[in-house]
Each structure stands twice: as structure tokens, then as C-alpha cells.
Image (tube, rainbow, N blue to C red):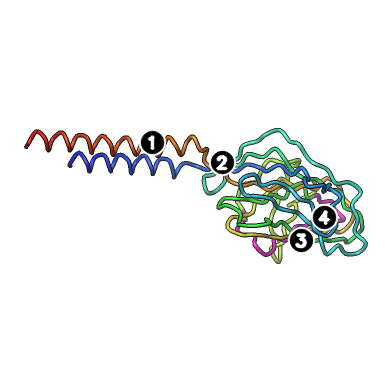
């Protein structure tokens, strides 16, 4: 194998090793910005938040039925947990929105949208703490823009499995508070899902996470490494050509 071929192969291995490593999927900061507050979730325009490098986005609760209202809407700060997802990515969760919805038989649609662009591959939406008793339960139906559900039960307030029933509606497998599940929302501009319940419960939560963008320093090191490898090949070839001459 020529020196040039070896250098290209080494550069290729470096690039592959850089690209196939598991991505870190991290919850975004759901703190309201641009004058919105958590109560903006139920108003036109919704709650505005920051996706960082992916721009601004918003969450809106619409289609409230049966006199549904919210006694509390709150930011949830959880201890950082790391979960290995089915696709090999690492999910780091420490930030969520919780809500306590009033009204028996109430339901509403959770809408999430970027102002521009699309959510990066690997992004997820997590729903957790759906409660169940002998008499009633809370449910979540994934909607447009939401892809496959991860098979892992994610760390949340409860430990009851969250499973899909008839029609693809998710609820706690038994009495108690459910663990969380993650749905793939990468590659879309917006997505939505429907929350419903048989009667009033409290403590439901959700979070949104996106894949980390590679640090500029990491990309710079990769480019510099490739450049150095090619420069070495070029210099050695020049020296060899001069020697032959």
C-alpha cells in the first residue's frame, strides 16, 4: 500500500471513529423566553423557549375539552440521569415541564414546533408520570410527527411500566405512577400528541431533548488532523521525487 493510500485510510478511520460514536441527547432548557410564561402554554402562540443552536421553538396546549384547566404548571428540575437508548445514543435528562390538569374526562393536545428548520436526528420527546388507579387513568396518544417509541423505560417519577394499549394509547401498566418513554421526533419541524384522563390527577410531566452539536473545537481538531496527514504525504512525495531526480 502506498504512503498516500495509508494516509487516506488512516484519515478515513479517523473520520469514521468520529462519526459513529454514540450521540448525546440532552434535554433543552424549557424556561420561557421573550416575555412568555408557563401560563402561555394555553394561549395563542404558546410558550417560547430556546433550542440553542437550532433556534427558538414553542409548546402550546390546544383543543382543551370538557372544561379542562390547569391548577399548576411548573418547571421540573431532576437529578441528571443517563439512559442508553435503543439506537445507542445516550439520553441525559434533567429538565422538564410538569402540569396538574383539572376536569374529569378532560383532554388536550400538546403541540411542539420550531420557528424554523427541523429537529436534528436523534431528538426525542419524553412523557412520564402518567398515573393509574382502580377507577381511572391518564393516557398519552402520540400524534403527527412522532416516530417509534424507545423500548427502554426512562428514569422519571415512577417505576410502573408505561405501555401501549388498544389504538396505540400509552398508560401505566398497573396502579401507580408510570416511568417515562421516549418517542423519536428527529427530522421534523413540529409534532403533537394527545393527553387525556378519566378524572383529575397531578404530577404529569414531559421533556424534549436534542442531540448535541459537535463542539467547534472537535471539528477543528478533526480538520487539522486530516490536513496534517495530507500535508505529510505531500511533503514526503515531493522529497521522494527530488531524490529520484
Among numbered discs 1 and 4, the one appearing first in the sequence? 4
- Structural distance between the alpha carbons of marks 1 and 4: 56 Å
| Label 2 Cα neighbours within 10 Å, binned few <14 / some 14-19 / many ≥20 | many
Which dot marks residue 120?
none
Mark 4: few, some, or many residues within 10 Å (few <14, many ≥20)? many
Q: Please give left or right for residue 16 compared with residue 87 in the image.
A: left
The image quadrant where one finds the N terminus is top left
Disc 2 target residue: 24
Relative depth, front residue between 5 and 227: 227
Residue 188, position in %: x, y?
61, 59
Q: Which residue is mark 1?
A: 224
Residue 4 in the image, given as x and y percentages of width and height: 22, 41
Sequence-wise first label, 3 or 2: 2
Residue at mark 3: 194
* On screen, residue 21 above or below 171: above
The residue pinned by badge 4 equals 137
Q: Could you say whether the residue bearing mark 1 is in a helix, strand or loop?
A: helix
**Mark 2 vs mark 1: which is more N-terminal?**
2
The outermost residue toward the left is 245
Gap between marks 2 and 1 measured at Cα: 24 Å
Q: Which label lies toward us, 2 or 4?
A: 2
Amino acid at each position: 500500500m502506498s504512503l498516500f493510500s495509508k494516509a487516506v485510510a488512516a484519515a478515513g478511520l479517523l473520520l469514521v471513529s468520529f462519526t459513529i460514536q454514540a450521540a448525546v441527547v440532552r434535554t433543552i432548557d424549557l424556561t420561557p423566553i421573550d416575555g412568555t410564561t408557563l401560563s402561555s402554554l394555553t394561549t395563542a402562540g404558546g410558550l417560547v423557549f430556546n433550542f440553542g443552536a437550532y433556534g427558538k421553538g414553542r409548546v402550546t396546549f390546544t383543543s382543551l375539552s370538557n372544561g379542562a384547566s390547569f391548577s399548576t404548571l411548573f418547571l421540573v428540575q431532576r437529578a441528571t440521569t443517563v439512559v442508553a437508548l435503543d439506537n445507542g445514543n445516550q439520553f441525559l435528562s434533567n429538565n422538564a415541564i410538569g402540569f396538574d390538569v383539572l376536569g374529569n374526562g378532560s383532554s388536550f393536545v400538546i403541540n411542539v414546533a420550531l420557528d424554523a428548520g427541523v429537529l436534528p436526528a436523534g431528538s426525542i420527546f419524553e412523557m412520564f408520570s402518567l398515573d393509574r388507579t382502580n377507577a381511572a387513568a391518564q393516557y398519552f396518544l402520540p400524534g403527527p410527527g412522532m416516530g417509534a417509541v424507545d423500548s427502554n423505560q426512562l428514569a422519571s417519577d415512577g417505576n410502573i411500566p408505561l405501555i401501549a394499549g388498544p389504538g396505540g394509547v400509552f398508560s401505566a401498566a398497573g396502579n401507580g405512577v408510570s416511568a417515562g418513554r421516549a418517542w423519536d421526533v428527529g427530522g421534523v419541524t413540529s409534532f403533537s400528541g394527545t393527553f387525556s384522563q378519566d378524572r383529575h390527577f397531578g404530577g404529569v410531566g414531559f421533556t424534549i431533548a436534542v442531540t448535541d452539536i459537535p463542539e467547534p473545537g472537535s471539528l477543528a481538531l478533526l480538520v487539522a488532523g486530516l490536513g496534517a496527514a495530507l500535508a505529510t504525504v505531500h511533503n514526503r512525495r515531493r522529497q521522494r521525487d527530488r531524490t529520484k531526480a
